Image: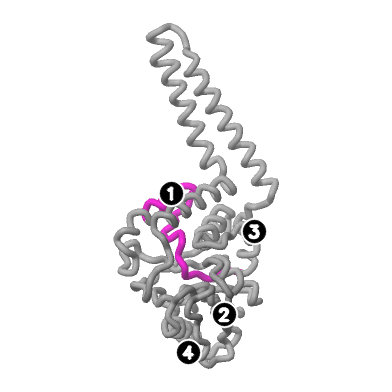
Amino acid sequence: MTPLDIIIPVFNEPSETVAQSVLDALKGFGRRRGIRIIVVDDGSRPAVDRQLLPEDSRVELIRHEKNRGYGAALKTGIRHGDAPHIAISDADGSYPLEVLPSLAAALEEGKDMAVGVRAPDSPGIPLARRFPKRVLNGFASWLAASPIRDLNSGLRVFRRDLVEHFWHLLPRGFSFTSTLTMGSLLGGFRVTETDVDYAPRIGRSAIRPVRDTIRFFRTVMRLGLLFAPMRVFGPVAGVLIGIGMLKGLVRDYFLLGYVGNLAVILMIAGLQVFLMGLLAEVVVLSRGLKQRNH
């Protein structure tokens, strides 16, 4: 099989939990060669203890002197490696790393990315986050015109050329995975999903539910504008033109005998928004951000 780099970002996770995650990944691949596990300690306090990690030549530890963010840690690990296929997972004991070989097999079959999908009612997802997560996935699915069951899953395998294609768009924070998912689907890449178990994490989560949910929505909207602007501009234009026509025809013309200024302004505004959407589509195509299935 194709060589694979497994990137595991760590921030304030117990060294024992990190070590167990690495062991689980090694267990899944057995003695297979071409596997490298890169643990990126993103400024943890206390730092990850290298002596607690498995004694295996395939395991490496990189340290950030200070916390840079989830996406930044992943980028460090990706740049450090060189394998054509890349896997990422958390080190909090929530994801079953033993499934990585099955996810990697999807890339051997021609997929660009394989995502481990958490069920919405998984015990590892707090009750307070389940409804916002459903709304976010639904909104992202509508923008991408494709079903997205788990926008920001932290367990996935993808091609190096895929992440390089979107490198300049990938943020330093938690929205790294959301950006990669949206970019891949809106860009026409081949993405597959596999159901995985998701257990309660060990330790305290660094995610701030309200702030990070708002940030995820903002990221999804930004990517919608970047890859499929008419999915954003089109409905706004339709609403403005529809309200303008209803007011101009139903209320103004039939009741008053003329079309009022507000109705005309609304219809013109809707037309302008529609034309801006068309212009944005031209810009997207000219920049070559989209890559259709091949």
Q: Nearer the viewer, mark 4 or mark 2?
A: 4
Magenta range: 134-159
Q: Secondary structure at mark 1?
A: helix
Of mark 1 and mark 4, the one earlier in the sequence is 4
Of mark 4 and mark 2, the one earlier in the sequence is 2
Q: To which residue does mark 4 refer?
A: 52
Circles 3 and 1: CB atoms closer than 8 Å = no
Q: To which residue does mark 3 refer?
A: 168
Few, some or many residues within 10 Å of mark 2 (<14, 14–19, 20+): many
Query: Label 3 is placed on what type of residue?
Result: His
Q: Which mark is residue 38?
A: 2
Instruction: Measuring from the top left, give residue 254's x and y in whole percent.
Output: 39, 10
- Label 4 vs label 3: CA separation? 35 Å
The answer to whether residue 146 is magenta is yes
Q: Would residue 15 be visible to someone looking at this image? A: yes
Instruction: Measuring from the top left, give residue 161's x and y in whole percent.
Output: 65, 66
